[in-house]
């Protein structure tokens, strides 16, 4: 059944339904949970740098470790989604994981960055095992959390505000990890006398403590309002009918392609600031450069992302979601590619261009999450099955799988251009070729990723009106089923 066919007739034939209101405090609590998540997960944007410059693992090998682990992690996502869909407890299907997984997430993050005196093969083995274990427990937290966005309300409009608020407040976690990490690191190393590796570890520990507390509070302050059927089919059966859901598949493909842009984001906050900015400010110590320019270079992109998040709910009232994604992809891609040719020696101009390059990211993160919720409604509307966990797990699956290739490519590019993580930036910089390779990833590669991500949306058919009709009809069916169950019980 096509969602658009007969949808208007259904709307005209049935009276409008009432959706339960989600209190503002609950929305904020749910969003703060994401702040805690990103506060910890944001640290992993520095994992490649940690492996190459702290554990002295070759960039190609470090990239391979991260890539293979993310492929393994991606495979786990649909499995975890199926587990969520089959979960039935007094707390619901998603909330139990918000209670039991935050502490293990923090523990394995700390173990991964623990300052053990490792080198060579032992460093490779330890980093590989700890990263795999971290991804397992993080997936057990992340899939139920985002699935919760589809069951916290039955109303697409309220879902829009929940997702927007979550992306907005949640982004504070990664922003703090990016902006304050090197300031903390400088405090521990330069002021308190910690070694380079211990300074890194202590900084990680601070974010893990605050992140865990924020993640845990979400369990106590949220509620599931959509009751699904815990008697789900097995994973392969669910995937079989989900493959027929074209809107979902197009969203997954677009999300995977867009993740190419994140390679440039990670390279910007780590390698570019440490080495390329050092080329401009050669007289500054490396720790000073990292603590000053990490927030300086990232503050405008962060502001741009926030602006995108704030305007997204208003834009979707005027434009179709897919059209917004296409327009912003073109805009961001062009700015990134133009930045490559402008260069970075005029650092302040480069920073301003970063603002415009990141304007689309807030819009994308907000709207694509809403669209996965729309796809959950679409599948329920066309099949009668509600599979939030599997839908959101497939989104992260595609993103992680593509991202694994990107990380491997990053390692290969760094290896090709002769990157040497053992160099001390206060003594000698990377070669000119290595610096050019880093800048290529920050700009040109990010621009290409943004442009190709829009392609699937030229074939996307779900419009805003159809999504509204589907959500209301799904709610009517659930209410009717509840009345029938009560009648049978009597």
Image (cartoon, helix red, strand yellow):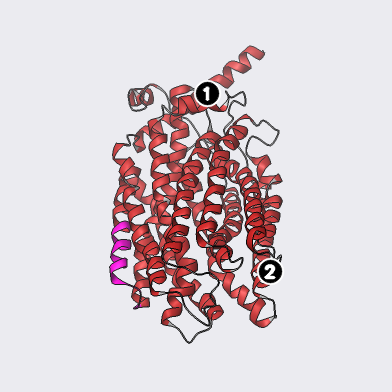
Residue under the image location 61 percent in, 56 percent down: 36
Circle number at residue 202: 2
Residue 134, horizontal then vertical, whole percent: 64, 51
Secondary structure at numbered mark 2? helix
Circle number at residue 211: none
Residue for badge 1: 237
Q: Would you say the magenta stretch is mainly helix, strand or loop?
A: helix
Q: Which residues are magenta?
A: 333-346
Residue 263, horizontal then vertical, whole percent: 44, 57
Quarter holding the C terminus is top right
Q: Is residue 254 above or below residue 183?
A: above
Res. 463 in view: yes
Q: Using the numbered discs, state the Cα–Cα distance from disc 1 to disc 2 in whole angstroms.
A: 46 Å
Residue under the image location 66 percent in, 53 percent down: 130
Question: Few, some or many C-alpha atoms within 10 Å of disc 2 (few <14, some 14-19, many ≥20)?
Answer: many
The quadrant in which residue 360 appears is bottom left
């Amino acid at each position: 059944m096509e969602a658009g066919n007969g949808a208007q007739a259904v709307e005209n034939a049935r009276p409008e339904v009432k959706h339960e209101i989600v209190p503002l405090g609950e929305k904020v609590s749910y969003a703060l949970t994401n702040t805690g998540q990103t506060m910890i997960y944001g640290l992993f944007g520095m994992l490649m740098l940690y492996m190459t410059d702290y554990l002295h693992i070759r960039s190609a090998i470090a990239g391979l470790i991260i890539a293979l682990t993310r492929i393994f992690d991606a495979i786990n996502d649909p499995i975890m989604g199926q587990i969520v869909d089959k979960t039935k407890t007094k707390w619901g299907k998603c909330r139990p994981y918000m209670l039991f997984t935050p502490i293990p997430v923090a523990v394995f993050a700390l173990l991964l960055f623990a300052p053990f005196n490792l080198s060579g093969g032992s460093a490779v083995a330890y980093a590989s095992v700890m990263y795999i274990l971290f991804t397992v427990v993080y997936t057990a937290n992340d899939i139920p959390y985002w699935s919760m966005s589809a069951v916290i309300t039955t109303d697409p409009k309220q879902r829009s505000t929940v997702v927007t608020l979550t992306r907005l407040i949640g982004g504070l976690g990664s922003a703090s990890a990016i902006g304050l990490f090197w300031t903390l690191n400088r405090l521990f190393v330069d002021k308190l006398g910690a070694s380079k590796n211990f300074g890194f570890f202590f900084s990680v520990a601070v974010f893990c403590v605050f992140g865990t507390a924020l993640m845990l509070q979400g369990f106590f302050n949220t509620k599931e309002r959509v009751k699904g059927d815990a008697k789900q089919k097995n994973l392969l059966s669910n995937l079989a009918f989900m493959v027929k859901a074209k809107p979902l598949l197009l969203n997954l493909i677009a999300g995977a392609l867009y993740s190419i842009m994140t390679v440039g984001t990670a390279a910007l906050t780590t390698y570019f600031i440490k080495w390329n900015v050092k080329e401009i400010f050669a007289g500054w110590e490396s720790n000073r450069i990292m603590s000053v320019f990490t927030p300086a270079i990232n503050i405008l992109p962060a502001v741009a992302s926030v602006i995108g998040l704030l305007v997204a709910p208003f834009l979707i009232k005027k434009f179709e979601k897919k059209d917004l994604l296409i327009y912003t992809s073109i805009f961001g891609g062009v700015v990134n590619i133009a930045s490559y040719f402008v260069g970075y020696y005029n650092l302040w101009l480069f920073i301003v261009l970063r603002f415009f390059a990141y304007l689309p990211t807030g819009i994308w993160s907000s709207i694509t999450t809403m669209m996965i919720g729309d796809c959950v409604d679409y599948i329920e509307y066309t099949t009668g099955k509600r599979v939030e966990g599997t839908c959101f797990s497939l989104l992260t699956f595609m993103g992680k799988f593509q991202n694994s290739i990107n990380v491997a490519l990053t390692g290969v590019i760094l290896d090709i251009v002769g990157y040497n993580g053992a160099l001390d930036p206060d003594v000698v910089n990377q070669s000119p070729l290595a610096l050019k390779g880093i800048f290529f990833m920050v700009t040109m590669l990010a621009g290409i990723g943004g442009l190709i991500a829009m392609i699937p949306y030229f074939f996307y058919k779900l419009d805003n009106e159809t999504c509204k009709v589907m959500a209301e009809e799904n709610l009517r069916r659930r209410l009717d089923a509840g009345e029938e169950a009560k009648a049978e019980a009597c």
